[in-house]
Amino acid sequence: MTAWTLNTVLYGIELVATLAFALSGVIEASRRKLDAVGVVVVAGLAAFGGGTLRDVLLDRRPFFWVLHTELLWAVLILGIVAMLFMRRRHLEPTERAMQWPDAVGMGLFSASGTQISLAMGQPALVAVVLGMVTAVFGGVLRDIVCNDIPKVFRDHRPYAVFAFAGGWVLVGLDQAGVPPWLGLLAAASVATLLRLLAMWRNWKIPAWRVNT
Amino acid sequence: MTAWTLNTVLYGIELVATLAFALSGVIEASRRKLDAVGVVVVAGLAAFGGGTLRDVLLDRRPFFWVLHTELLWAVLILGIVAMLFMRRRHLEPTERAMQWPDAVGMGLFSASGTQISLAMGQPALVAVVLGMVTAVFGGVLRDIVCNDIPKVFRDHRPYAVFAFAGGWVLVGLDQAGVPPWLGLLAAASVATLLRLLAMWRNWKIPAWRVNT
Amino acid sequence: MTAWTLNTVLYGIELVATLAFALSGVIEASRRKLDAVGVVVVAGLAAFGGGTLRDVLLDRRPFFWVLHTELLWAVLILGIVAMLFMRRRHLEPTERAMQWPDAVGMGLFSASGTQISLAMGQPALVAVVLGMVTAVFGGVLRDIVCNDIPKVFRDHRPYAVFAFAGGWVLVGLDQAGVPPWLGLLAAASVATLLRLLAMWRNWKIPAWRVNT
């Protein structure tokens, strides 16, 4: 029963995170005026890049998108529907519009990536680093392919730090004996909310050099 | 006998695709005025990038270029010979000259990548996606390293779509009971010829936004 | 006893190479005025990128930084200390300052990568190529993330060639019956010293085209 709850929560989190990153990819690719194929490819890279790198680093097969091929179809359909919708409404998405789904995907993947790494017996620091890689890499691919400096390195508001923090929340709750599914939800929420707060309040990482 | 035929055809296709991509790398690197070492490195990335990523994603070892180290030597020699030849003739290759071997490599790798994935028991959609990754990734690496937006995202003529189509041709013929070696040749030909047609007739992917 | 010596030398080489590349990452990221998080991330990519790709290609788990998590802490601390030090002294590092640790990391990783590949039963050419990948990839990631054409392709002074040469020195000494730990030290020294010589004497790779 607990295993079933954990697996359901984990799958739900990966599903929402995948769709959120796919949406961020659609928005970014459409801002860059890529053609229809480019939009779907960028959505796919953003959605599956982080989790695939995590699975390669953990030597975990089959990949989550091979086990759940419905995710491939979901991203394909989401890409097409989002394109038609934006075209109908003559929407010109802003960079800010892209950051909302990006924040959700980052927060959720940092929790699920850390949880999966812990469950495969990695030490805490390694699990947190792998969670951060899962959370960040899809967005990095999306930005590189759109010929942009990855936002994670460019945006002076904190980003990767919150993925790191979300991972440590999960590790801490796990050590404290909190049920894993609850820890997952808490860690995902903390990472996502911190990022949304940082966007809203325009938090800056303190500059480390006086003369910049 | 059939297994022998299949393996021979498969090896032949991978050999030709590897050399074609290596040639596209030599041409692109020479257009960018890289030095001699850079030319050989870019040729190697273009030739081995897609197949290596496919083998990593399939967890398939040894890599095709470890099993067949003669491919490493072939690419090294092709790089040097092509450089000397272009220097002798004072050739200044155009972007178009690069697209010919690129189309051949893309078509052939899409068929071989899909076939190898199917043979390792992947579901059809996953096999086709992995075939597309094999076909596209070497060229993406080549373009990124030459500091270019990858042609697959920039060229508004269809490219990745034909790799996708070639994969489905292979799956369809496989389901129809056609011998695998024949399906391989058919799928490779379809993907390559579609791309050559698109280059010749200047087909465009329909713009998905009115105001672009 | 010999195995113990070899493992100690190998670990020492990987430790020094990791810290050297981390330092090159800190310098490069600070030159690009990245924020504090960006500096640590770039240091980590430079330090762990090459070895991780090597381990993925060799299907070697756990990764060297999972076996030795003290390396993760060391890079984190080095990043913070180096930032504070440069800030205190108002140091503005030059590109040349970055090339010193980069040369050390390249030379050491080319030897250790080749040795590890040989020990896992790879043929000589494959081992040398994997050693070169180990030596070069961390720096490539560092440069790409800083939105730079990777120095390995841009710097007309030889670089990858010396990683290649270092690998062949190791293979040759191994064939000649020299103890592996001694071969490691010799190959690492040869590759590093050649690169430092090339920087000092400003060696150029012969241009392969007359009209460039």
Image (cartoon, coloured by chain):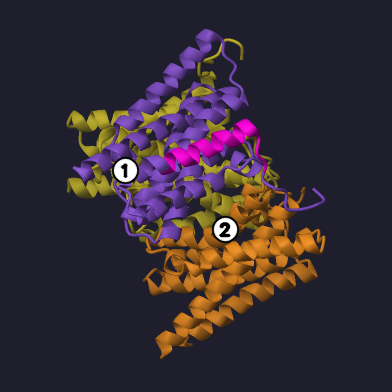
Chain colours: A purple, B yellow, C orange
- The circle drawn on residue A181 is 1
Number of other residues with Cα within 10 Å of mark 2, as a class: few under 14, some 14 to 19, many 20 or more = many
Cβ–Cβ under 8 Å for marks 2 and 1? no
Residue A63 image point, x, y percent: 33, 44
Q: Is residue A51 left or right of residue C131?
A: left
Magenta region: A187-204
What is the spatial separation of the Cα atoms under label 2 and label 1, in whole angstroms? Answer: 31 Å
Check disc 1 and report its element: helix, strand or loop: helix
Which residue appears farthest toward the bottom when viewing the image?
C1
The residue lying at 49 percent from left, 78 percent from top is C10
The residue lying at 17 percent from left, 48 percent from top is B1
Q: Quadrant of the C terminus of chain B?
A: top right
Give above or below for C187 relative to A106. below
Residue B193 image point, x, y percent: 42, 28
Please name the residue that numbered disc 2 is placed on. C44
> Label 2 amino acid?
Gly
Number of other residues with Cα within 10 Å of mark 1, as a class: few under 14, some 14 to 19, many 20 or more = many
> Label 1 amino acid?
Trp
Asked whether residue A52 appears in the rendered view, the answer is no
